Amino acid sequence: MIARRIVIAPQKYPPTPVPDHAVQFYESDSSLIELLARELAAALNAGDIVIVNATRKHRKALRANLALRGIDMGAAARDGRFRELDAAECLAKFMVNGRLDRDRFESVMSGVINDAKAALKPGHRLLLFGEMVALLWAQGRREATIGLEELWRDLAQRHALHLLCAYPIHAFGPPKYQRDFSSICEDHTHVNAVAALRLAALCRITQRRLARLQKKARSLEAEIQFSRQRMQTLQQVTQAGTWDLDSSSDVLTLSPAAAKVLGYDRESQIALSKFFDLMYYSGDREAIWKHVEAAQKQGVDFKARFRIRRGDGTRIIEMQCRTLCNRDKRVTLGVFTDVTMWAS
């Protein structure tokens, strides 16, 4: 009898979708719809599931553009591959007295996503375009916008979403432009500033207006590069407990982890004077103040410790600082770490 050798081919598994969170800054509704339709049509043709959470005007324009690209919108909707939500109605379900309710957001959006994932075939993506952040920004709710971006980022990671949001570029004019634009860029894995760079080509303008727009485009690119440098620095230091200090207003901006280290529940920004009030030893206040002053004026990095009271006990907090330069402006940022266990 001849022995036969049986070879079993290795089992192949569909690749796991990689989550990402992209943002598009656009100059006109038509440019936004064109970009979205191109990406969503490719996703639908590939068998992915698409959720559009947008304004009524943009949903209508998007459906029309997708139909022109040969997408059978009726069939896609019946098969559950194309799903629509109204951004304003959805937003109202988890905004309470002008504030984000995290639990309601989780309940509303996780329900939508889980329902869509149930129909998702292995190896395919779940792509979601959302405009709720743009609506909040248009209402002047800066903190709520950035908070919602953070919630979306966490949701995208947990559900392996391909997430895309968009803002009109003209919404980021001075004086709030630099700081807020940087914060939003940091919450995304991909940033697209093509619309800003094409403003001159899209508009018929005078030479003087053209020069101002070109300057704005260069500033936009510089902000993106600076935001990326800032993110890389934070990642090198730590992924939790981060803070940054605006020297022009002496306001300390805290990540949720940093706020928790200092004993706050929800505070995201505190005055520098309030931060020093946390230290009950005058020697700690004097030492930290000298370090902060040297960082702001001379760009000196430092690592120092101070003590605060939390509950019935004393906590020892380590403060690490790094100073970056953006054009002629110094930005001070770093991390807070509770080192009580190691210091005792």
Image (spheres, grey):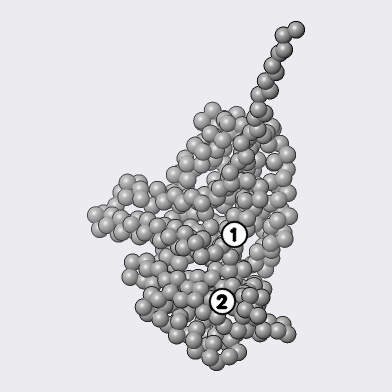
* Res. 336 image quadrant: bottom right
- In depth, the one of 45 and 257 nearer the eye is 257
Measured as percent of width and height from the top left, residue 317 is found at 59, 78
Q: Which residue is mark 2?
A: 318
Instruction: Say if 184 sits above or below 159 in the image.
Output: below
Q: Is residue 88 left or right of 333 when viewed as pictured?
A: right
- In depth, the one of 235 and 183 nearer the eye is 235
Q: Residue at x 53, y 34 (%)?
A: 42
The answer to whether marks 1 and 2 mark residues whose Cβ atoms lie closer than 8 Å is no
Q: Residues within 10 Å of mark 1 (few under 14, many from 20)?
A: some
* Res. 64 image quadrant: top right
- Going by the numbered disc 1, the residue's amino acid type is Glu
* Farthest bottom residue in view: 282
Q: Which residue is mark 1?
A: 150
Tag 2 or tag 1, which sits nearer the N-term?
1
Q: Is residue 196 left or right of 311 when viewed as pictured?
A: left
